Image: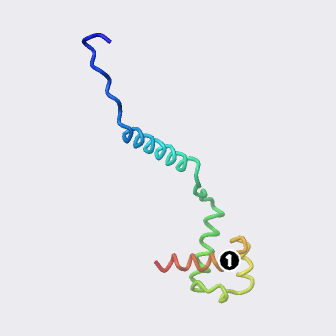
Amino acid sequence: MSNNEEPRKQVPMPVIIAACVALLGLVGWWGYRNLGPQETPKTAENTKVDAYLQEMAKKCGGDFSKLTPEEQLKINGMAGGRGAMAIAGIARGLKK
């Protein structure tokens, strides 16, 4: 060291830890946004299914047993066997 140079100051440990936590948080958020769950793109078929399920939810008021057996079968096919839950959830969403 020459006489003109000032001694280097050390970075305090809490600052280093805070920087690491912030970096990990940023990388985690970025990964979730880009690699996490993605919204299903809307297609003409999805739109038809959504409209039909909303129509049936309005018709029965969320009570799956009020629908005809044919309608129940069709809805169960569309909802992967969970037609009653789908209709109840859609009806709750419509009431809000």
Residue 1 sits above or below residue 32 on the image: above
Q: Residues within 10 Å of mark 1 (few under 14, many from 20)?
A: many
Count of numbered circles in the view: 1
Q: Position of residue 31 (x, y in %)?
A: 54, 46
SS class, disc 1: helix
Q: Position of residue 37 (x, y in %)?
A: 59, 55
Residue 6 sits above or below residue 46 on the image: above
Q: Position of residue 22 (x, y in %)?
A: 43, 44
Q: Is residue 68 left or right of residue 1?
A: right
Q: Position of residue 34 (x, y in %)?
A: 55, 47
Residue 57 sits above or below residue 15 on the image: below
Which color scheme does this rendered protein use?
Answer: rainbow
Occupied quadrant, residue 10: top left
Q: Which residue is mark 1?
A: 83
Occupied quadrant, residue 80: bottom right
Q: Nearer the viewer, residue 54 or 26?
A: 26
Which amino acid does the dot numbered 1 rest on?
Answer: Gly
Name the quadrant of the N terminus: top left
Q: Nearer the viewer, residue 32 or 11?
A: 11
Q: Is residue 95 left or right of residue 9?
A: right
**Most extreme residue toward the left, as rendered?**
4
Q: Nearer the viewer, residue 50 or 34?
A: 34
**Most extreme residue toward the bottom, as rendered?**
66
Q: Residue at x 30, y 21 (%)?
A: 7
Q: Is residue 36 left or right of residue 15?
A: right
Q: Residue at x 72, y 74 (%)?
A: 81
**Most extreme residue toward the top, as rendered?**
2
